[in-house]
Image (cartoon, rainbow, N blue to C red):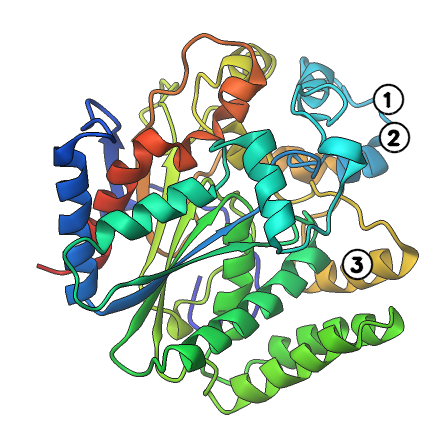
Amino acid sequence: MPSENNFQHDELSRKSPGERLTVADLAEVVPPDSPGWTEAMATCGARLSQAGFACVVFLYGSIHGTDVFGTQRLDEVGGLKRGYSRGVSGLDALLAAMREESNGIPLLPGGFKPPLPDNDATKTLLDEQVGDAGNFTEAYVQEFKQTINKNLTQPITCVRLLWSSEHHHLGRALAAVSLLDELHKLCRRQNLGRGHRILVQSHGQAGLVLALVSNLLCPSPITGRPKLLSILSDYAEQTNQPEVAATVRQIESLLATASLLNGVALDIVTFGMPVRYGWDPSGIGKLLHIVNHRNLRTDGKSWLAKMELPQITMEMPVAWGGDYIQELAVAGSDAIPATESGKAANKRVWEMVEPYDGFERWLECARRAVRFPSEGRCLLVDYKDSTGSTNPRDHYYGHAVYTRRHALLFNTAQIVCAFCEG
């Protein structure tokens, strides 16, 4: 997407990413408990520090209990969970594999649902329930922090942020404002300025939150920014959330004066992010998208996922082709806000950021099988997580492996290679 993207949706191009694309395998890796692993991480830390990185932020949500495939919206527009086939063989079976009640992904204890608060109790609950499956655990972040800082006199700060996991437009837009507020506080707390860099690693739909952030950070006075912030401010006031309304006003002021990050460059990595919102590269630093992918195509377009019915219903339970949540949670899918005011505000945001509506449009977007947005570097990785198991908790349909402990060094080395010159 262009500079001044102004919240346009990604064009979902099926063309080859060309030089933007790199392919890798998670082959034999150094065991995480070995001295060689620690030294390799320390080397990565030294390169990050030399490149100006002062902080690494891990932004993540919950796969459990959040309608991660977005079938609530599909059911709402698709006819009360019936009559989906419309002449497309295998479509009903695919939707059954996606729905919360039949996809094998557990709910959270006690019916706990989004918005999830970013506090220690919730993070601990997710660590206990989910482990390192699509979840940046406290142990993962601490191990990253300790090893990259092993030989540094000026340690790199590491921050773990849990976003609300509201998988709809309103939830992601509110999360974008909340994240900008956290980044502003971080810059002030650490006295960061021009020459410093912050790296955000984001899993799944947290990447979509950052796509909205990239549009909000556009240095030009785009028309969409005041419009989106006005929608969020109105919603916060209507729902008696004065703190949220105050944060939106503060962020609007800081964006207007280009002082929110105080000249700090914001570099972003996404892991398994569905392709939806367009990115604006003009207000951010470097951008890298990493996707778990195994080529199943026979047409030479190895950078695309394979979306053929009914075959996909046989491949998906063993994550044969890679990350199916990344592939299927595209435009037209979503969770639904719980309140009428939330639904109304969500519709206003939807009209801004995503022109695709209706069940057929979701199917069209899913069948495009696009793995990457139109902006940023692209890395396709075979993470070797398809073991033949049909238990979703072993792979979460290819969406879990990015945050597994055994992939930590590999991911870090790939980020260093992409973001640190020389």
Q: Nearer the viewer, mark 2 or mark 3?
A: 3
Asked if residue 217 lies left or right of residue 249, the reply is left
**Residue type highlighted by circle 2:** Gly
- Residue 81 % position (x, y): 85, 25
Label pair 2/3, CB-CB below 8 angstroms: no
Residue 321 point in image, percent of width and height: 43, 21
Residue type for callout 3: Lys
**Residue 123 visible, this orientation:** yes
Q: Is residue 274 above or below residue 176?
A: above
| Helix, strand or loop status at disc 2 | loop
Tag 1 and tag 2, C-beta contact below 8 Å: yes
Cα distance between the residues tagged 1 and 3: 24 Å
Which mark is first along the chain, 3 or 2?
A: 2
Front-most of residues 108 and 411:
108
Tag 1, which secondary structure? loop
Residue 139 found in image quarter: top left
Give the labeled residue for mark 3. Answer: 347
Residue 414: give x, y in percent of width and height.
24, 44
Q: Nearer the viewer, residue 192 or 397?
A: 192
Above or below, comparing residue 64 to residue 119 in the picture: above
Query: Farthest bottom residue?
Result: 257
Label 1 is placed on what type of residue?
A: Arg
Quarter of the image that includes the C terminus: bottom left
What number is the disc on residue 82?
Answer: 1
- C-alpha span from label 2 to label 3: 19 Å
The residue at 72%/30% (across/down) is 107
**What residue is disc 2 on?**
79
Query: Residue, x 47% and y 61% (percent of image)?
Result: 279
Q: Residue at x 57, y 33 (%)?
A: 128
